[in-house]
Image: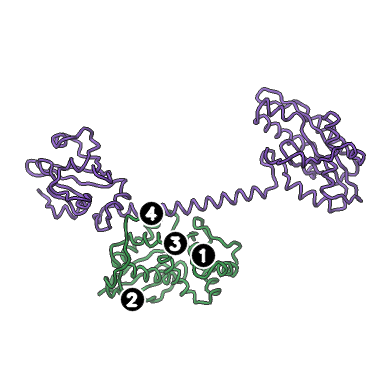
Chain colours: A green, B purple
């Protein structure tokens, strides 16, 4: 698993609960280190182990923790870059939803060894969508829920999200787009200098 | 015109249509944003843009004559943005010209300077992908750069904790301290030799540091080959060495080892066709089973003996006896060697 995933979990826990909680989680997961390197590769088994350890340490269900991670990744000021990169996908929320099909390929353009789980958008009638997510780590659909919630807000769209279950490495998130211009949304300045 | 202006506006939002006189008679929606203070329409194309290549284009006649349809141009007004352009004559008589513009590599600045958004580019244009890549790669490079810095820090820390002298491959002072501390705590007898090279400074001064480094490496080989595997040979300063010899029953063995080392060090060492000649002074101390000396005592006694060797004319070995202390100045090797690592 690419170090970016694990490092994101670490950053989330440190920024949300503090480094003491992170160190305790790392101990629970039997890591013999506490710092993940974003640019290194780690054993696949480490990611679910650390997620379970965090869940136990902060006493919250793992799926809730995973949704919070998704929210954190696109809303924390430290990750402004992630939000910006996602905004490149489309001019409105629906456009953005469709661009998720290309997310894995886009990520690989930037980092050839980064394999994001594949996502496929099914377009039903009347603003109903299903997001079919590959879930190499159980609960990945919940991470996407967190991401989508923030991004809908960012585009100023009102959307209802529901994790409709999954199995065998596939999870589905149902998206109902109620209003595309619910609020102003956040400005996306294409030419802003990356900080 | 085969293709109407509304079609061009969608396909090439950064295009301009020029009249025969070189006036801009139509501008695509994105092209219109390039002129920050005024309307592009009605202005002379060559007064708005400076043609960089092909060279020496000053009039529309020049432009019409050129066979090269590819243009490199620049806004005459600030921010003097550079563009790539392609020019196609249109109309029955070819009296109109369509120029399609692209930011090329100035895309990052261009998008900022003219406050452009996704909608300002044709859906087939790779500009957005380009911007995406620039940001994603910058973020990835920054993460890699930070990793490199951390790895470099870890490397320096590891070197500081290392027990090896990088030039000679011998043990260093830290390793020596560790070994000696263990020896003085134990009850077995052992020996310590402090060795200073003689005339080494002359080699360095006359033949250069490369020769000096070569000599030190040969010296290290000699010391290792003249001692046992269980002995510890350490370089503790520029031309200062210490050897710890465990399980030495008396001083005789050490006298023989010291003699052999001096004899071999006095053999000329060849470097780039020159002979480097050095020797060594040795101070030796033997610690018996009942001896309670501290590590500092042992090293200090070895220094007293070393000083006696130097005082007696160098190139010799002295075994420590308490009587030597009376003649030696109260100055240990470690004190003579102020800032040894500065060498």
Element under disc 2 = strand
Quick check: A87 above or below A158? above
> Are marks 2 and 4 in one subunit?
no
Residue picked out by circle 2: A160
Compute the Cα span from label 2 to label 4: 31 Å
**At numbered mark 4, what does the secondary structure look like: helix, strand or loop?**
helix
Label 4 marks a residue whose chain is: B
In front: label 4 or label 3: 3
- Is the residue marked by circle 3 packed among few (<14), some (14-19), or many (20+) residues within 10 Å? few
Same-subunit check for callouts 4 and 1: no
Q: Is residue B214 left or right of residue A174?
A: right
Question: Which residue corresponds to mark 3?
Answer: A78
| Residue located beneath label 1 in the image | A10
Marked residue nearer the N-terminal end (1 or 2): 1
Q: Which residue is mark 4?
A: B135
Q: Is residue A20 left or right of residue A119?
A: right
Please give the chain letter of the residue carrying mark 3: A
| In this view, A131 is above or below B228 | below
Image quadrant assignment for residue B63: top left
* Image location of residue B279, percent across then percent down: 78, 29
Identify the element where label 3 is drawn: helix
- Which residue reaches farthest left? B92
């Amino acid at each position: 698993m690419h170090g970016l995933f694990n490092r994101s979990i670490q950053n989330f826990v440190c920024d949300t609960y503090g480094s003491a909680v992170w160190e305790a989680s790392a101990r629970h997961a039997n890591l013999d280190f506490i710092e993940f390197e974003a640019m290194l590769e780690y054993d696949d088994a480490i990611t679910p182990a650390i997620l379970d350890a965090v869940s136990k340490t902060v006493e919250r269900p793992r799926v809730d923790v995973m949704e919070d991670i998704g929210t954190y990744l696109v809303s924390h000021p430290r990750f402004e870059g992630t939000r910006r990169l996602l905004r490149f996908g489309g001019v409105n929320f629906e456009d953005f939803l469709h661009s998720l099909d290309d997310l894995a390929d886009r990520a690989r353009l930037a980092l050839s060894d980064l394999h994001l789980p594949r996502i496929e958008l099914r377009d039903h009638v009347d603003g109903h969508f299903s997001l079919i997510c590959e879930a190499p780590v159980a609960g990945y659909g919940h991470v996407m829920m967190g991401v989508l919630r923030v991004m809908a807000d960012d585009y100023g769209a009102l959307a209802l999200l529901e994790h409709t279950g999954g199995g065998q490495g596939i999870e589905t998130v149902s998206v109902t787009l109620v209003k595309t211009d619910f609020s102003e949304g956040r400005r996306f300045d294409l030419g802003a200098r990356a900080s | 015109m085969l293709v109407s202006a509304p079609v061009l506006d969608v396909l090439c939002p950064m295009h301009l249509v020029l009249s025969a006189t070189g006036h801009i008679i139509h501008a695509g929606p994105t092209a219109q944003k390039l002129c920050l203070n005024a309307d592009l329409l009605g202005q002379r194309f060559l007064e708005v843009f400076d043609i960089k290549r092909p060279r020496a284009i000053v009039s529309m006649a020049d432009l019409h004559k050129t066979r090269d349809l590819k243009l490199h141009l620049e806004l005459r007004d600030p921010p003097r943005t550079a563009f790539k352009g392609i020019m196609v004559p249109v109309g029955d008589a070819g009296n109109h010209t369509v120029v399609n513009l692209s930011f090329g590599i100035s895309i990052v600045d261009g998008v900022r300077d003219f406050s452009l958004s996704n909608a300002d580019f044709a859906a087939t244009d790779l500009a957005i992908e380009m911007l995406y890549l620039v940001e994603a790669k910058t973020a990835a490079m920054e993460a890699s750069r930070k990793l490199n810095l951390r790895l470099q820090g870890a490397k320096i820390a590891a070197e500081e904790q290392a027990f090896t002298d990088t030039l000679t491959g011998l043990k260093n002072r830290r390793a020596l301290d560790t070994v000696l501390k263990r020896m003085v705590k134990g009850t077995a007898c052992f020996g310590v030799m402090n060795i200073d090279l003689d005339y080494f400074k002359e080699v360095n001064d006359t033949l250069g540091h490369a020769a000096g480094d070569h000599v030190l490496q040969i010296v290290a080989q000699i010391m290792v080959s003249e001692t046992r595997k269980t002995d510890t040979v350490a370089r503790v300063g520029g031309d200062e060495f210490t050897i710890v010899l465990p399980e030495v029953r008396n001083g005789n063995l050490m006298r023989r080892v010291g003699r052999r080392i001096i004899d071999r060090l006095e053999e000329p060492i060849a470097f780039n066709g020159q002979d480097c000649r050095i020797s060594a002074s040795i101070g030796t101390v033997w610690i018996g089973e009942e001896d309670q000396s501290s590590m500092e005592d042992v090293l200090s006694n070895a220094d007293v003996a070393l000083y006696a060797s130097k005082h007696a004319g160098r190139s010799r070995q002295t075994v420590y006896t308490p009587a030597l202390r009376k003649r030696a100045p109260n100055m240990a090797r470690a004190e003579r060697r102020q800032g040894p690592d500065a060498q």
